[in-house]
Image (cartoon, rainbow, N blue to C red):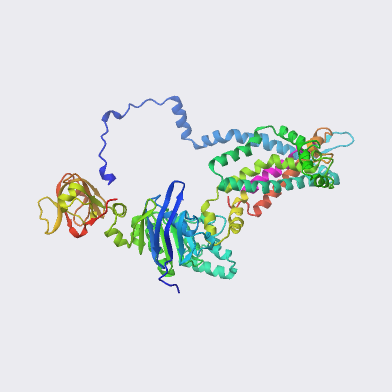
Amino acid sequence: MSILDTKPVSVSKSSSYPALAPSSSQRVSTYIYQRPWLIMILLLGLPLFWMIVIYLGSLATLLLNSFYYLDSFTGLIVRQFTLRTYANLMTRANLDIVLRTAGMASAVTLSTAMLAFPLAYYMARYASKRIKGFLYLAVLLPLWSSYLVRVYAWKLILAKEGILSWFILQTHLDWLLNALLSAPGIGGPSLSVSAIGIYIVFVYVWLPYMILPIEAALERVPKSLLEASGDLGARPGQTFRRIVLPLAFPGVVAGSIFTFSLTLGDFIVPSALGNSSFFIGQAVLSHQGTSGNLPLAAAFTVVPMAIMVLYLIGAKKLGAFDAL
Amino acid sequence: MNDPAIPAVQFSEVSRHFGDVRAVDGVSVEILDGEFFTMLGPSGSGKTTCLRLIAGFERPTAGRILLHGKEVTNLPPYERDVNTVFQDYALFPHMTVGDNIAYALMIKKVPKTVRARRVEEMLELVRLSGLAGRRPAQLSGGQRQRVALARALINQPRVLLLDEPLGALDLKLRQQMQIELKAIQQRVGITFIYVTHDQEEALTMSDRMAVFNLGKIEQIGSPSQIYEHPATPFVAGFVGVSNLINGPAAEAITGSPATFSIRPEKIHIIARGAGVPEGMHAVKGQIRDVIYLGLYTRYLVEIEGGLDLVVVEQNLKTTSADLLTARGKPVCLYWNREHVRRVMEA
């Protein structure tokens, strides 16, 4: 009916405008429009230059340095290809540093994933628009303050005279804390000087980097998939294991890349809350600074990179990127 | 096997409110075992919510739902013997076509060899043999539709729910799938409950259909009953095109001001002055607009009394060239009294 109801609209003859000569900005636009390769160069030129020259360039220099060695007699760097520095890296003390750091990174990654998943799931599935906005803010707000400030704030919270110890004393759980602190390897005189303290602060500072990618991944799972799974006879637990988890897995992997690599390279948290047991970041800092052993510092830096490459290959084998 | 006296689905006074919105408002309906039942209505009329109530994705605010005589009002979806074909197909993107189809059997822990055989049968039923190894993303829209159907049928449910399953397909494919769906329903012999807003689809496929409007059912009946005897002005307007005539125009034609409806294809259009057969309703008018549609021509005729009627006529003799001069012509319309339907005013 509606088609038939429309009456023809009369168009006045004077409605066309006289053609103007193209302005210079119009000519530039047309010139670029007709040359797609120019658009590509304009878009990618600067970032590509940055990536290739600055980033990959310094990585290559770093890699190159790790194949030189420090002459312990003269204290000079010998620019000669050798695997001597890597042999040095394989000593017991240095391997301990690597294992300690990788162990911490794994523990932090696992814990953040377990803490982040329920929150991300709630945000993606159940939260109303307002609560979701509030939760987003709550997750992101800590990132607006300096990371150093937050680490030192935690040092105060965890200190022997700090609020946490006070709370534990009030709830008569100090026996538990003391037992934890006397455990070999992870303990120390107080939470603010122990591996447990480092672990707590790492979990706190990296948690947002785990929540956001998981939330984004869960957000992309259509509700109808969960309904379809239930419709086909799966109980909620089975739906979670068969549908939700596999589809959220890329998000977990993305988040774990952040938490894992950030922990591997960090030197501030262990120096603020640790004892004399070094982490990789601290080793790099001291070798390239105080002892002037740039090759060994470089070799240490290669370790987290190698671990991340292996990690990504493993994740790919597990099918983490299949659902992308 | 099944007692045909017990309806497959029974709604008694079922309501589902979302806040102030009454999506489903006191609906009572019985859907018979083995029939192809369509819920037709515009978007927001409550038809999809009704389907979701049967599947168990929604729980009613009030009322009871029975499946094959057993109360399921508060049972979760995984404890109901119904399966659903979703509007967006809802195929699991991280699984192959074969794993998607086998999902219900995997959940039931059916042995792998049996599963593989059943998947083969299902693929054959929906004519997709050989595609078990593909991912859903590698399929066309029509193929995905068939996978969704196979996945929902493998569990041999007694009721299959279809939520606008052909909505995303193009016209040709949709018509082909309509025929295929109907054939599959007859082969597997289970109840199909089909939700659509496409009245043509509803008329073609259904054994019976319900027309929904504003959360209520306006009319339930066979396609021909609904089309030939629309019970309300809404049904008359929504199912097919209807001319509603009321007031003085109605009085001039039938002698009574009561509203009646007449289908466009039941109206004969002749030149003014040509003889009208005995015993017909007749009215004079003028052609306001003409649309040539290949198979037939649609006229918009303004009748005496100021109403516009839509008239369609098959192009038995006319050509598009004849129609150029038709606009503005005085004509006479007539139709058989028996084709007139009185409709209740809402």
Name the spot of residue A209 as percent of width and height, x first.
65, 41
The reply, left or right, for residue A2 in relation to residue A220 is: left
Q: Main secondary structure of the magenta part?
A: helix
Is A267 colored magenta in this rendering?
Answer: yes
Q: Nearer the viewer, residue A97 or A273?
A: A273
Q: Nearer the viewer, residue B111 or B199?
A: B199
Residue shown at the point (55%, 50%) measured from the top left: A221
Q: Is residue B95 above or below residue A85?
A: below
Name the spot of residue A233 as percent of width and height, x first.
55, 62
Name the spot of residue A170 as percent of width and height, x first.
78, 41
Q: Nearer the viewer, residue A111 or A303?
A: A111
Residue shown at the point (85%, 44%) measured from the top left: A93
Q: Give the residues in magenta.
A: A251-271
Q: Nearer the viewer, residue B143 or B36?
A: B36
Q: How many numbered markers are drawn?
A: 0
The reply, left or right, for residue B48 in relation to residue A119 is: left
Question: Which quadrant is the N terminus of chain B positioned in?
Answer: bottom left
The reply, left or right, for residue A261 in relation to residue B180 is: right
Q: Dividing the picture into quarters, in which one does residue A44 lie?
A: top right
Residue shown at the point (17%, 47%) measured from the top left: B248
